[in-house]
């Protein structure tokens, strides 16, 4: 009985280099950014939020937050006027990074940059558009993460 041993051909050097380059690029891209999906909120259970945090060449952190299905703050109990996005850092405490405006389709986004490394992002409902401290009405919270 004869065994069928097909001879395996080696990958040409040019193709091997392309494959390795692609793998290396994918690792580098994923190593430089963090994508965090927020858990379901008790306050606004239909809302879905994702934040992407990426460290740039200047060692700043780019924050891209996208939220969908988030009811207008005036529909909350108690009703509020604004959504404010906060970031928690290890060394600099909690920082207001901007307002989250919701469009007619109940979606919103916030894109910003900061020198401080975030470890958590959360959204509060506020009456003031520029609060110094977050209210206790937290509508979405990413939980802690590492960049």
Image (spheres, rainbow, N blue to C red):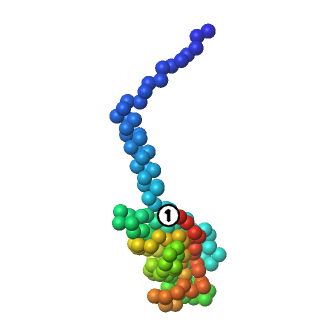
State the residue at coordinates (38%, 64%).
56
Q: Position of residue 74 (x, y in %)?
A: 54, 86
Give the structural element (helix, strand or loop) at label 1.
loop
Quick check: 48 above or below 124?
above
Q: Which quadrant of the rendered structure holds the N terminus? A: top right
**The quadrant where residue 47 appears:** bottom right
**The quadrant where residue 10 appears:** top left
State the residue at coordinates (35%, 66%).
58
Q: Position of residue 7 (x, y in %)?
A: 48, 20
Circle 1 packing at 10 Å, graded few (<14), some (14-19), many (20+), is: some
State the residue at coordinates (62%, 78%).
43
Left or right: where 18 falls relative to 50: left
State the residue at coordinates (43%, 55%).
29
Q: Nearer the viewer, residue 139 or 22?
A: 22
Name the residue at the top extreme: 1
Name the residue at the front extreme: 91
How many numbered marks, from 0 up?
1
Does residue 81 appear in this view? Answer: no
Q: Position of residue 9 (x, y in %)?
A: 44, 24
Left or right: where 113 falls relative to 70: left
Q: Position of residue 27 (x, y in %)?
A: 45, 50
Label 1: which residue? 147
Does residue 138 appear in this view? Answer: yes
Name the residue at the bottom extreme: 128
Left or right: where 74 falls relative to 11: right
Name the residue at the right extreme: 42
Quick check: 30 above or below 96?
above
Q: Nearer the viewer, residue 122 or 66?
A: 122
Q: Nearer the viewer, residue 2 or 94?
A: 94
């Amino acid at each position: 009985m004869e065994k069928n041993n097909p001879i395996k051909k080696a990958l040409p050097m040019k193709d091997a280099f392309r494959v390795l380059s692609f793998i290396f690029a994918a690792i580098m891209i994923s190593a430089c950014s963090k994508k965090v999906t927020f858990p379901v909120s008790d306050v606004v259970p239909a809302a879905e939020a994702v934040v992407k945090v990426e460290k740039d060449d200047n060692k700043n952190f780019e924050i891209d937050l996208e939220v969908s299905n988030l009811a207008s703050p005036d529909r909350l109990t108690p009703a509020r006027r604004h959504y404010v996005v906060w970031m928690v850092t290890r060394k600099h405490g909690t920082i207001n990074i901007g307002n989250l405006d919701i469009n007619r389709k109940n979606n919103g986004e916030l894109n910003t940059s900061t020198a401080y490394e975030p470890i958590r992002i959360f959204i509060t409902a506020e009456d003031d558009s520029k609060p110094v401290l977050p209210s206790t009405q937290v509508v979405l919270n990413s939980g802690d993460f590492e960049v």
